[in-house]
Image (cartoon, coloured by chain):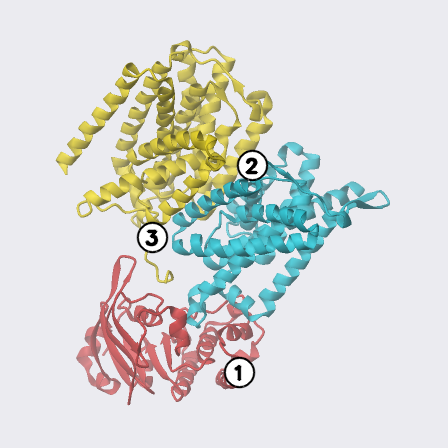
Chain colours: A red, B yellow, C cyan
Amino acid sequence: MSILLKVDNVHTYIGQYHILQGVSFEAKAGEVSVLLGRNGAGKTTTLKTIMGLTPATSGKITFDNKSIEKNPTYDIATGGIGYVPEDQGIFGALTVEENLKVAMRKEDDAALARQEYVLELFPDLKKYWKKDGGHLSGGQKQMLSMARAFVNESKLLLIDEPSKGLAPVVIEKVMEAINEMKKQTTIILVEQNFIMASKIGDTYTLIDDGETVQSGLMRELIDNEELKRKYLGIG
Amino acid sequence: MKSAFQVNKILLFIIVAALAVFPFVSDSRTWTILLTQIFIFSILAMSYDILLGYTGIVSFGHAMFFGMGAYATAIMLDRFEPTVGIFVLSIVVGMCIAGIISFLVGLLTLRLKSHFFAMLTMAVSGLFLVLAEKWRTLTFGNDGFTFRAPDFFKDRMMYYLLVLGCLVLVYLFLRRFVDSPLGRVLIAVRENEQRTKSLGFQTLHYKVIASVVAGVIASLAGSLYAVSLRFVNTSVLTMDITLDALLMTIIGGVGTLIGPIIGAGVIELAQHYLSGLAKEHPIFERWIIFFGIVYILAVIFFPRGIVGTVKHLFWKRKNPIKLAIAPKRKGLAK
Amino acid sequence: MELLINLLINGLATGMLIFLLAAGLTLIFGLMDVLNFAHGGLFAWGAFSGVWFYGLTNSFTLAILGAILTGVVLGFITEKLIIKPVYGNHVQQILITLGFMIVLSEMLKVVFGPNQLAAKTPPLLAGSWEIGDVIIIKYRLFIIIIGFIVFGIFQFILKRTKIGLVVRAGVMNKEMVQALGINIKKVFLYVFMAGAALAALSGVLMAPYSGVIYAEMGMEFAILAFIVVVIGGMGSFPGSLLAAILVGLAGSFMAYYVPALSLAVNMMLMAIVLIFRPQGLFTAKG
């Protein structure tokens, strides 16, 4: 399988803080790669750096055979990367419909078809079509955020902790949706919930103190008690 | 580092001594008056530096404190006897009023974000200008009034020396102030207010202290200014005064104290010569345009000002100067 | 009763002019976190260029269009040369936009001379209607109508068009808008130009209203606009309309009943709002 995204020894500063101190991993087309690590390890910053929101100070990021680490955020997004941030980034005073409309770069048949598809995936959104994004529940916001990333034709989705703060029943739904989306696109997922991560993920990358510790296949990690205990505090 | 400091001190002493001797060797009235003016605005600009350079806050209302001093002195010398005693008393009164007002305004406004603060100080200062224009029985509005200065200052030279003395005292006082632990906290506020707060400092208190000190010193400059002209009108409360202080501080070098003094010299001299050129070409009547442009360029390309840049070139490694107005790296700024 | 109506119309007309100025300020602030202290300069340029165009063409319509064009061009220059280099640094922004304000108003004196100019009301809009005891000055009514029309147009754009949605979304969350593939810098340039056009429109409408124009009018009027932006809530378009009307009415009623307080009343309004509701009456960040 071809490599869609390659992050190579990336360093990122936020202000004067050296947050990422050498992150490297690859995401293969069609797979779900999960970034694992403790709180504050640099997982979210890794996603933001890929998006160009906290640009890399050094290192290379290659997406679809093009180097993107110097590109502005909007260029990276139009290049085919969708982003679902940790706080969901919903426009609170815009309705569900308007949130999707802002995201849709081209309102053509393909985009409308994709919109139909996500609305089937998340029937709640259709129900609250005219409701302000700010008035949705946490789970609905998560779904809206994922739907918004999906209405454009994206080759890669970056999803940051979709299970955070959600009830177990809602997590189930979100997981189902990710499993669906995975059929159509490549996904990089940041997830603290190891059970969820291990069910969805094909590969993993462990990040600790802003550095990549190890990457590999998810099923190998599931059996590696030592790694799990040392870096995830489980097992 | 220590020796550099000593050299500085000696150099400063020589300059002050030379300036003190100047009126005895030169009998140029123009120069004495011009230098007096420069010293007064140096005091004002230094007080502004406490805000902009050391605490990292932009006030657009600094003229109000300058105006308070000017009016306090002018009104008291006019209504009472023009004696040195009244003059000193009026300075104290002006400082007290400025101190109280800057305390109240600071308490009310300094908790706001920089934009709001700048705007609000501009508006409050505008309010004082309107007040002075309307309260004609006290101020004679825009027409202003002349008054007699104490006889002691009839001699321009004496006044020159007095103002020079004030300048040196204010410089030494402010130097002490910014080097004190309190001054260090102010610099911390400038560098990163959030972090200073999380270290347990009530940053609002420190910002209020800075604004009171700056206000009081500005009032002193106003008092000295009024007596140097023997006249006062509402122009002492206008935005132009604030702009002068701002220009002098930025061009001279923020956060250096010496910078504003040099900035005051540069601007007053340039103003003197450029307005003199107005006879040659009318564009020079609008000399402030040149300052506006120089100032904009300075903010973008030259944010350290004259002194800051010189320091930066010489002590780049040892003593990096950080500035509130130096461009910050930001993810968005791409 | 007729007094009340007259005061009401005065207040509304002034309010509308302030609104046109404040609308641009509030959107620019909301979207890009830039408070443009040079906004009053754009207003004054609108007034002067409008009067100049009017003298040239003798058509008030062309004068308005000319002023708007001036605003758009100046807005483009301001954004590219002045605002862009200092994105993200508040202190620099404040300093530099104020510096540009000085340059703008001094340039006015270079181009149009240092003295104040008289501005005539176009004949069609001069005079007044008398309805019973109520005298309605035509030009004031004209300003009010223009104000509401502009509000309607912008409200439509903000609510119903894609670019309007993007602007509103940008006010709420800039990062996310960019992460959705939108070049927010470009959007900001458009908004800045639109805001400058509104400021210039406000200026050209102000000219016949006050009868004379002078370079300093920019700063004087901009302070009112700042107050309105604070009261209405930074970034809120309807908020700025409401606050502008409030400020206009307060000014006109106070000027009649308590003249001594008329200039202080807006300051007091702003102080009250800042103390009790620092985010303004309306919030745009949802």
How far is mark 3 from mark 2, CA to CA?
Answer: 36 Å
How many marks overall?
3
Element on which disc 3 rests: loop
Query: Where does residue C115 sit, x and y in percent of width and height?
Result: 59, 36
Query: Where does residue C178 sit, x and y in percent of width and height?
Result: 43, 68
Q: Are marks 1 and 3 on the same chain?
A: no
Depth check, mark 3 against mark 2: the one in front is 2
Mark 3: which amino acid? Answer: Pro
Q: Residue furthest left?
A: B3
Q: Residue at x 54, y 43 (%)?
A: C111
Q: Residue tagged by mark 1?
A: A108
Q: Are marks 2 and 1 on the same chain?
A: no
Are the two marked residues, 1 and 3, in contact with CB atoms closer than 8 angstroms? no
Determine which of the numbered discs, if any, sits on residue B327 in the image.
3
Q: Residue tagged by mark 2?
A: C114
Q: Image height check: is C226 above or below B173?
A: below
Mark 2 belongs to which subunit? C
Are the two marked residues, 3 and 2, in contact with CB atoms closer than 8 angstroms? no
How far is mark 2 from mark 1, CA to CA?
Answer: 57 Å
How far is mark 1 from mark 3, CA to CA?
Answer: 42 Å
For this view, does A117 lie left or right of residue C121? left
Depth check, mark 2 against mark 1: the one in front is 2
Element on which disc 2 rests: loop
- How many residues crowd mark 3 within 10 Å: few (<14), some (14–19), many (20+)? some
Q: Are marks 3 and 2 on the same chain?
A: no
Between A15 and B271, the residue placed more toward the observer is: B271
Q: Residue furthest right?
A: C132
Between B245 and A215, the residue placed more toward the observer is: B245
- How many residues crowd mark 2 within 10 Å: few (<14), some (14–19), many (20+)? some
